[in-house]
Image (spheres, coloured by chain):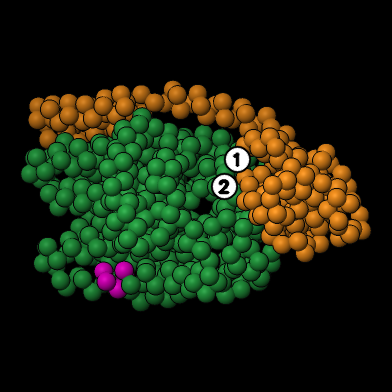
Amino acid sequence: MTRGLAGVGFALLGLLPLGVGILLLTGAWRQSRGILRLGLGVFTGIAGAIAVLPPLLYAGLSPSIPVVLVLGGSMLVLGLLIDSRRKPRRAGPEHRSVRLELLPAFVIAIPLCLLAVVGVQKPVNRYDAFANWALKAKLLFYDGTFTGALDDRLFASGSVAPPVHREYPIGLPAVEAYVLHGIGGENLRVAHLLFVVFFGGLALFVWAFLRPWVSAWPLAAGLSFLLWMPRARSQGLSDYADVPLACFFAVAALLIGLWLAGEGDDRLALGSVFAAASLATKREAIAFCAVLFVLAVVALLVRGERNRLRPLLLAGLAVAASTVPWRVFVAANGLEEGDVDLSLARVRAQADELPFVLGQFGHLFFESGYLGAVPLAALAALLLLARGRDRQLAVGVLALGMGLIAALAFVYVTGDASVHYLVRASAHRTLMTPTLLAAVLLPLLVTRGLGPGGSREGT
Amino acid sequence: MTTVLVALGGLVAAAGVAWSLPERRRALLAVPVLVLPIALTLADTLHDEKRAIDRYFGLTPIEAEVDPPLRWPEYENVELLLAIRRLVPADATISFLPGGRWSETRTAAEARSIYLQSGWVRWVAFVIAPRIVVPGTDASWTVLVDQSPSEAGVQFRRAWRFGSDWLVQR
């Protein structure tokens, strides 16, 4: 196990150049300092690798240590070049560097350390894990050190033989395969630590980017809420892609929301990287990202900020373009879209199932395992509206929440299999995205709902 | 449900008393609101995770990596899996030919297609990867399910029996 732990640590460090390069390139490098900066670098590196490794795999390269180091080195050099030419920023409150104090460090470390102990010896024991996600990771790990990891027989041809769902994006298996390269063997039990890192990365991003808006104690309480959520913890170690998707999308929505609130373009650029990572993780992200970007466009139009539409549309285009290699690969190889059929006729035929789908969602939102994250966020937003403050924040959160839920319901009614079966079998995990996003926003919403007015902490 | 209702009640109560506090302290009310749901579930979370730790740390390598995590009583053959991992080269392909009770009412092709899509074969493919399970019959290694090489009419170089199943090298 010691070798496995060292291997995971080595693999994560190997992602640091890529992450730091992306942070420098987007301009978000100076948002944090100290250990927090390293944490953001690693998580950004994971997101970057998940977005970039699949096209490299399609091009014939392997998700190995040398390939990732060369990729990271190139990104780091590019980032340093771009950053050195950037003008010094104005010293607004959102541009003050945030550091990780002792209190939040403990708040983040304790639940994550316990989760790591649970995960480090956990076997791969869920159906979709061994039939799909972890199997693909294992297969990508074994074939090819520099090139040839993507075996056409397993990934580029429809077949009844495993792995299942060859049409799914392969960002997560690619990064897991990279971690297995770091470990130097197929120890998928220790590789569960990667999933603990997703939670840690999300928590660090929330701290780094919300700290200028929320004071330390409520934000630490919010992180505890996020990291101790029972359903998220059990789902996080399932080897499924739902929690990674939720973490990436929550960061993307947070950063793009901050950009909409008037913060710098680095938020939009970095948010787009995380949106692209979510798209390379799981297909629901297509619907989620569409909702996010459409609502952002609507927000700018309603506020009459047409001059900001151009960067947003460019970012949206870049994010959409990141899916092209995957979609081309799926179409070119005739991989079946097994369980979702995006025909309007199907939606019409199954529209009467919507009340059932939404009813199940509502039922799950009130399960204690989710700690009431979504109902609490909705109530806090309504409280803001009732008190007549931060109306844009409240309306934005409610619109995004309802948009995500509607998008998910739409995905279910386009399903090829029985809607009842699909919802009962998977809604508890697909709801992770709106749930974790609600948990991320809760400290901001609750402190705004209860506290005095003002735009930012300390202003 | 109770946890969520208590959490919502906590937020409403905090909103109710917030006006009586100095403005600078109101935001601190968020702390009990956010900690309350954790407090209500933490004991169960810790209990569940302690049980999981005890269970996972007590597993032998075979229990953790080869024994199926779900039950497929008609299919399971752990000895066969261990043999495949031991005998079959990592770059080999493996096909499955179900016979016996699997092909009594079906053609051989139908039986093979159904068997390949079973949860057990998904588990087999995971355990024996990077060896590749192929849908056809032309692999370098074959598992004869519930039938012998002579019953299957298969030519082979070597063969091993594990219960009612056979592993053969073509």
Name the residue carrying label 2: A129
The image quadrant that residue B30 belongs to is top left
Screen quadrant of the C terminus of chain B? bottom right
The main secondary structure of the magenta stretch is: helix
Residue B97 percent location from the top left of the image? 76, 53
Name the residue carrying label 1: A125
Chain identifier of the green chain: A
Residue B42 percent location from the top left of the image? 41, 26
Can I make out residue A206 in this image? no
**Pointer 2 chain:** A
Q: Name the residue: 17% across, 47% down.
A: A394
The one nearer the camera, A128 or A302, is A128
* Position of A65 relative to A43 (above/below): below
The one nearer the camera, B31 or A351, is A351
Q: Tell me which amino acid carries mark 1.
A: Asn
Tell me how far mark 1 sits from mark 2, CA to CA.
Answer: 7 Å
The magenta segment: A312-316
- Left or right side of A261 for A198: right
Q: Name the residue: 46% across, 55% down.
A: A339
